[in-house]
Amino acid sequence: MASAGENSRIWREANSNEPDLTGQRNRQARTGRGRILDDEPRVLIIVENQAVPFDRRVWREACSLHEKGYEVTVLCPRRKGSAKGYEVIDGIRVYRHPSPAEGSTPLGYLWEYAWALFWEFWYTSWIYLRHGFDVIQGCNPPDNIFLVALPFKLLGVRYIFDHHDANPELYVSKYGKRGTLYRLLVALEKLTYRVSDVVIVTNMSYKDLAVNRGGVPSQNVFVVRNGPNRETFKSVPANPARKNGKNYLIGYVGNMSVQDGLDILLDIAQQVKNSGRRDVLFTCVGGGTELNKLTKMVKDKDLLDTVHFTGRVSDEDLLEILSTADVCVNPDRPSEMNDISTMIKIMEYMALGRPIVQFDSKEGKFSAKEASLYASKKGYVADFADKIVWLLDRPEERRRMGELGRKRIEEELAWEYSVPNLLAAYDKALHDN
């Protein structure tokens, strides 16, 4: 934990010499709930598990709201590569609070979330006094951000829950059991639903959770999908040097956590190598709590010539790696959590015209359809590896699948198609009594 002097320094750094973007406003009183709305509605978005702008969903939401005339402030943790306590990016205020190392055990998560909750409350109080806000949007995990919002709801502030992960299912995915902590997570989720004025979800499976498990009226739940921004996330020329002398590149982007199945991907890479294919390189982009363990596993499995972990990279490097990839993969561990979740990596692969191999899942199939091959959950390592090799040997099929995916993004799933639902959610939160 930081010392009292260090905490004081962090607070001064975050709030000194801060430009005031608010200006003078004409305030209009609104009856019914005692709220005051500005000509430009003010939004505070709180995200706990990633820094902004690296959390691409949260950043797209913030930018879209700002473009539509909302005054947007984001509160998130400090992370490597985004350590400034305060900055303004594209007209959006970003505050970052101190944070401990990411948890990887139940006790570690409890400490991480308690620490974050403490700082979120104090920063939120400061932001309210400094700038004001009409809406708080809380982005899980975890499902405790509603505790920060509760005092401000008494002042007429509305609360929107942006449901990223089904935490009870996530817990089972990580630890394989349902006990006291599982029941606590279910209770927190239900309390979050009860406190929320509006719920934003990533797909219809999560809407069903909100309505059926959370008791939220269907008209208060809005599906805002994880589509990429076509203007900023698009293919760039391939760079053969990214293949490190190999003929083929398999690309992955995402977190390196237990539920993300990177250990499974290493077994798949080993299966491909042992089948005699020494011409394939697996490149995995991203960071997370399991990265050091996975790097050691690469060495232990004699895969140093086959698997490369880059850690977090710039957007430019990410686009070049994925644009060079012959096939992209999603090895998310088969589980109830992953079956009902929409993975943004799938949408990004499709936007770049990459064919995909992933496990058979409800929402994965909805997103990718014919742009992906689906490995069986039984004998999954061998089947997944076989499907990768099958695609590598069929360039025309790779091209066909890639084009189908790109077309689906361009015509149905790009971020621009989600913006109307995002704005409708905010309109309901601000104007429904």
Image (tube, rainbow, N blue to C red):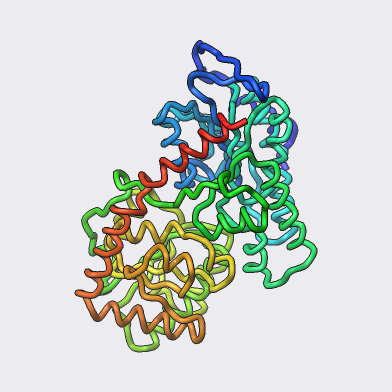
The answer to whether one can see residue 276 in this image is yes
Q: Quadrant of the N terminus?
A: top right
Q: Which residue is painted at 42% across and 72% down in the image?
A: 358
Q: Quadrant of the rendered structure where residue 146 is?
A: top right
Q: Quadrant of the C terminus?
A: top right
Marker count (numbered):
0
Q: Which residue is painted at 68% across and 27% down in the image?
A: 125
Task: Name the residue nearer the viewer: 160 or 34.
Answer: 34
Residue 106 screen position, x and y as percent: 72, 60
- Please state if 363 lies on the left or on the right of 2 as rendered: left
Q: Quadrant of the rendered structure where residue 397 is?
A: bottom left
Residue 229 screen position, x and y as percent: 35, 46
Residue 100 screen position, x and y as percent: 66, 47
The answer to whether one can see residue 321 in this image is no
- Please state if 209 lies on the left or on the right of 276 as rendered: right
Q: Which residue is painted at 64% across and 49% down in the image?
A: 216
Task: Name the residue nearer the viewer: 124 or 209.
Answer: 209
Give the answer, above or below, for where 13 lies relative to 374: above
Give the answer, above or below, for where 56 lies relative to 261: above
Residue 34 screen position, x and y as percent: 67, 21
